[in-house]
Amino acid sequence: MKKNNTLLFEVLILFMFVFNVNAQDRVITTGVPFLLITSDARAAGMGDIGVATSSDVFSQQWNPAKYSFANTSGGFGISYTPYLSKLVNDIFLGNVTYYRKLNDKSSWATSFKYFSLGDVQFNQVIAGSIVDQGVERPNELTLDLSYSLKLSESFSMAVAVRYIRSDLKLSSDLDNNSANSIGVDIAGFYQSKPFDVVGMNSIIRSGFNISNIGPRLKYDVGGKQNFIPTNLRLGTGFETSFDNDNILSFNIELNKLLVPTPIATYDDSNKFLGYKQPDIGFLEGITQSFNDAPDGFREELKEITWALGFEYTFKDAFSLRTGYFNESIEKGARRYITFGTGFLINQMNFNVSYLFSTSNVRSPLENTLRFSLAFNIPESI
């Protein structure tokens, strides 16, 4: 994607699309929002949920505590998500994940995410002439490591540490446009022992994950600081087996960004200037995020998104999925239905998903196929 406009115009247009920020005054925005994009096609096919679903290779993003309940001793996964694919062909999210069980109770995992914002043409006007200063590729990435441990036969917890780098290349001077931070995840997962429901073997799962707890990103350009997307996920699910070959699961998940709600700002003459997030530390921001909405508790509820997801599996070899994601119209208006399918062939699991919006706000992933491929290590611990 190359353009011949001035740098300022290009950056403004690019990020208006990429970050999908619409005109609502108090929509909560953060830096590195790609951390909230679903990278694996299994979760994407179920309405972007995964905190309380059964364990798989890509549990690192959703709930690393699930790895302690994995049925295989390890796995490796890769995924590819095109972004704004109807407009450009070089914006994408790539992900690589690996996990390994140390024993029956503990596991570790690592993952790497890379978000490419495509090629950006840098120009400068000198003496009335446009001077080509070359092409750069803005990008953002994360590298993380997690450890999970079973505290009982039914419950596990995990902690993850994540390095975050945002290199937006806001100017041709490559030394003044990047920002770095560290994020910490704290997660828990419950999986019941099988029990009987009207003659069918069933399992209940529940989970939580407080992700990306860490300092704000500070860019060298203008000293601007952005909160990273600290996020609370809560979910539960019910799985039942009709027989040895047919399994159906239903899951529900709630999400809330633990980031302050934007506040109204005024100039010295008391003229309204707009909304912006308060200049406070990240820990204070997390605490404040539960009770800072100007319209009180009703607005706080609107800042919670919810999603439903279904998965049908036949002989652990073929899966069909669907889901629905809902966000308040006043807080972003993301509403969409997803579909997905998966195939297991010789310990290799291939998944694909598809999304289409049900609101007037079109998703950057509208009519986009997402792909993920996972390889399981079958030996049991």
Image (cartoon, rainbow, N blue to C red):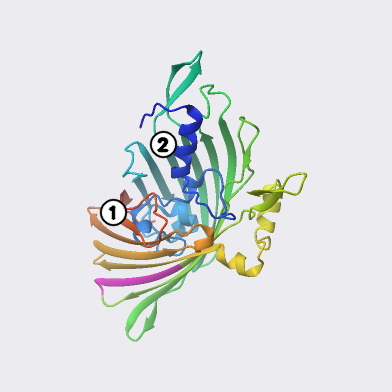
Identity, as a three-letter code, of the amino acid under mark 2: Ser
Magenta-drawn segment? 244-252
Residue 15 vs 208, above or below: the answer is: above
Main SS of the magenta part reads strand
Q: Which residue: 45% across, 33% down?
A: 10
Q: Secondary structure at mark 2?
A: strand
| Residue picked out by circle 1 | 352
Q: Which mark is residue 116?
A: 2
Asked whether the residues under the numbered discs 1 and 2 touch, taking CB atoms below 8 Å apart as contact, a structural biologist would say: no
**Where 106 sits versus 322, above or below?**
above
Left or right of 31? Residue 97 is left
Who is closer to the viewer here, 197 or 255? Answer: 255
Spot occupied by residue 162 in the image (x, y as percentages of width and height): 54, 43
**From mark 1 to mark 2, how far is it between C-alphas?**
21 Å
The percent position of residue 109, horizontal first and vertical second, equals 46, 48
Q: Decide whether residue 117 is among the magenta residues.
A: no
Find numbered disc 1 in the image and state the secondary structure of the residue it sits on. Answer: strand
Question: Relative to residue 116, is residue 198 depicted above or below?
Answer: below
- Is residue 208 visible from the viewing direction of this image? no
Residue 94, by quadrant, is top left
At horizontal 29% and vertical 54% (from top left) the residue drawn is 351
Measuring from the top left, give residue 177's x and y in whole percent: 56, 29
Badge 1, how many Cα within 10 Å: few under 14, some, many 20+? Answer: many
State the image coordinates of residue 337 (x, y, percent, origin top left): 35, 63
Q: As shown in the figure, which amino acid type bears the numbered disc 1?
A: Val
Tell me if residue 165 can be seen. Answer: yes
Judged left or right of residue 318, residue 25 is right
Image quarter where the N terminus lies is: top left
